[in-house]
Image (spheres, rainbow, N blue to C red):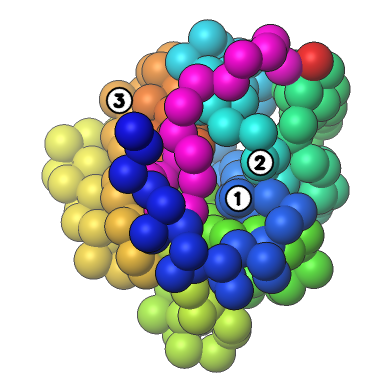
Amino acid sequence: MWRLACVFSLLLPLAAKAQDCRLALVLALDVSSSVNAEEDALQRKGLAAALLSPEVQRAFFAVDVPVALAVFEWSGRYNQELLLDWQLIGTREDLLNAASVIGLSNRSHSEFPTAMGYALGYGARLLSRAPACLFRTIDIAGDGINNEGFGPEQAYAQFPFADVTVNGLVVNNSDYEAERSLISFYRNSVIYGPGAFLEIAQSFEDYERAMRRKLERELTPRAVGFDLRPRNREPG
């Protein structure tokens, strides 16, 4: 007998407001000047491959309530470009389409610095027009600390981040001391909200593995308000 009935009954009002999906997930790719063309290609192809990995597909389709997905790239203060607007991922075909859009996308800018506060503000605004979902997460990846404009702390104070989780993916791509500083920056200033965590890629060649681990953790249904029995049908 499945022991979720009591929890589910307590969450019925919340679940009724979130019928569209269980998670609104924003993925943010760093295209600042520290990321060269080869590294950018590795992160785009790595994200597309991670989305289609068996582990991540199982997490997407573990329950019948879909996930809403949006993806953008970011660099300078005014340099955020939407790669994938909100799409409900309810079938494998939906996921294939989303991965294809990301894998075939072209970089919009390459010469601007790292304005992470502005990127987080853009992500918050993107979430404000997401489908109604039970949980909301921004997933921000990068290989450097904020070096233009206001930082993450100011973004969290000025933009609507109530009930939003911000997870991080650090790309360790420089010397040891820089790596230590970057990890500390993400841990102390970037990750935010309930259950926030940090994943570390040891290089852009390691991006796909790290992204796969992070997506699997983010997408695995939480034992709150859902029947977690396996689905009886294949997605798509």
Q: Quadrant of residue 2?
A: top left
Q: Residue furthest front?
A: 1
Q: Residue at x 77, y 23 (%)?
A: 91
From this viewpoint, is residue 113 visible?
Answer: no
Q: Quadrant of the N terminus?
A: top left
* Depth check, front residue: 167 or 228: 228
Give the amino acid type for the residue marked by disc 2 in the picture: Val
Residue 65: percent from left, percent from top:
66, 41
- Overall secondary structure of the magenta section: loop
Q: Height in image: 217 above or below 184?
A: above
Q: Which residue was labeled with disc 1?
A: 22
How many neighbours does mark 2 have within 10 angstroms: few (below 14), some (14-19), or many (20 or more)?
many
Q: Height in image: 204 above or below 12?
A: above
Q: CA distance from mark 2 to mark 1?
A: 6 Å
Q: Quadrant of the C terminus?
A: top right
Q: Residue at x 75, y 54 (%)?
A: 20
Q: Is residue 97 magenta?
A: no
How many neighbours does mark 3 have within 10 angstroms: few (below 14), some (14-19), or many (20 or more)?
some
Instruction: Magenta stretch: give its range.
Output: 221-235
Residue 65 badge: 2
Give the amino acid type for the residue marked by disc 3 in the picture: Gln
Contact (Cβ within 8 Å) of mark 2 with mark 1: yes
Q: Quadrant of residue 87?
A: top right
Q: Is residue 194 left or right of residue 105?
A: left
Q: Is tag 3's residue or tag 2's residue first in the polypeptide sequence?
A: 2
How many neighbours does mark 1 have within 10 angstroms: few (below 14), some (14-19), or many (20 or more)?
many
Give the amino acid type for the residue marked by disc 1 in the picture: Arg
Q: Residue at x 48, y 64 (%)?
A: 9
Q: CA distance from mark 3 to mark 2?
A: 34 Å
Residue 202 badge: 3
Circle 1: element type: strand
Q: Is tag 2's residue or tag 1's residue first in the polypeptide sequence?
A: 1
